[in-house]
Image (spheres, grey):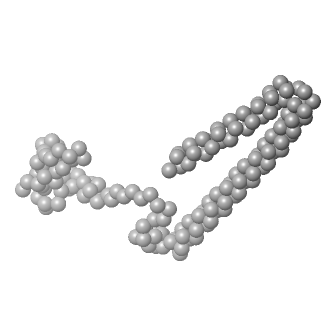
Amino acid sequence: MEGEQIPANGNSKKAKALEDGDIIIPEPIRPIFDKLPPEDRKTVMMFMRAEMSIKHSFRKAPLPDPEELALYNNAAPDGANRIMIMVEKQSAHRIQIEDHAIREQLRQSSGGQTKALIIALVCLTFSFLLAWHGNNAIAGLLGGSTILGLTTIFITGRNAQKKDLRNKK
C-alpha cells in the first residue's frame, strides 16, 4: 500500500504504509526499517505513533485555551480560577503602574514648563532693564539667547514626542 509523505519543506515524496495502515515510512528510511526484526518494527511504529500524536500550538494571549483551563482544573483544585485571578491581578497591577507613570510624566512636564517660564521671564526682565540703562548689546544677547534656547528646547521636545508615538504604533 502506498501513501504520500509531505515533508516540512513542502516537497512530496512517495512512502509505503506499514501492515496496519497507520504509519507511513518514508522511502529513504524504508530499506533500514525492512531489515529490522518484527519486534523492533513494532517498537519503531510505537514511537512513530507517539511522535505523530504530538500537538503543536502557539498562542499570544495572556490566558490559556478553555481546553487547557479544564486540564488545569484536573491538575490542581480550582486551577482555572486561580489562573484567572492571577491574570486579573496582573492586569490591575499593569494599569496601576501605567497610570502612575502617566501622572508622573505630566507632573514633570508641567513642572519643567513652569520653571522654563520663570527663567524666561527673569532673563527677559533683565534684558529689558539692561536695554533701559543703555546696554543694548548685552540686552539683545541675553534676550535673544533666551528666546532661541527656549524655542530650540520646545521644538526638540515635540520632535521626541512624535518619535515616541511613532515607535509605539
Q: Quadrant of residue 140?
A: top right
Residue 124: % across, % down = 83, 37
Q: Is residue 148 left or right of residue 33?
A: right
Residue 110: % across, % down = 75, 51
Q: Is residue 139 left or right of residue 61?
A: right
Regarding residue 119, the answer to whether it shows in the image is no
Regarding residue 27, the answer to whether it shows in the image is yes
Q: Is residue 32 left or right of residue 148?
A: left
Relative to 147, is 41 above or below? Answer: below
In the image, farthest residue toward the top: 137
Q: Residue at x 90, y 33 (%)?
A: 132
Which quadrant does the N terminus fall into? Answer: bottom left
Relative to 138, is 92 above or below? Answer: below
* Label total for image: 0
Residue 60: % across, % down = 44, 57
Closer to us: 34 or 161: 161
Q: Quadrant of residue 139?
A: top right
In the image, farthest residue toward the left: 1
Closer to us: 12 or 167: 167
Q: Residue at x 53, y 49 (%)?
A: 168
Residue 13: % across, % down = 13, 46
Q: Residue at x 81, y 40 (%)?
A: 120
In the image, farthest residue toward the right: 133
Closer to us: 87 or 30: 87
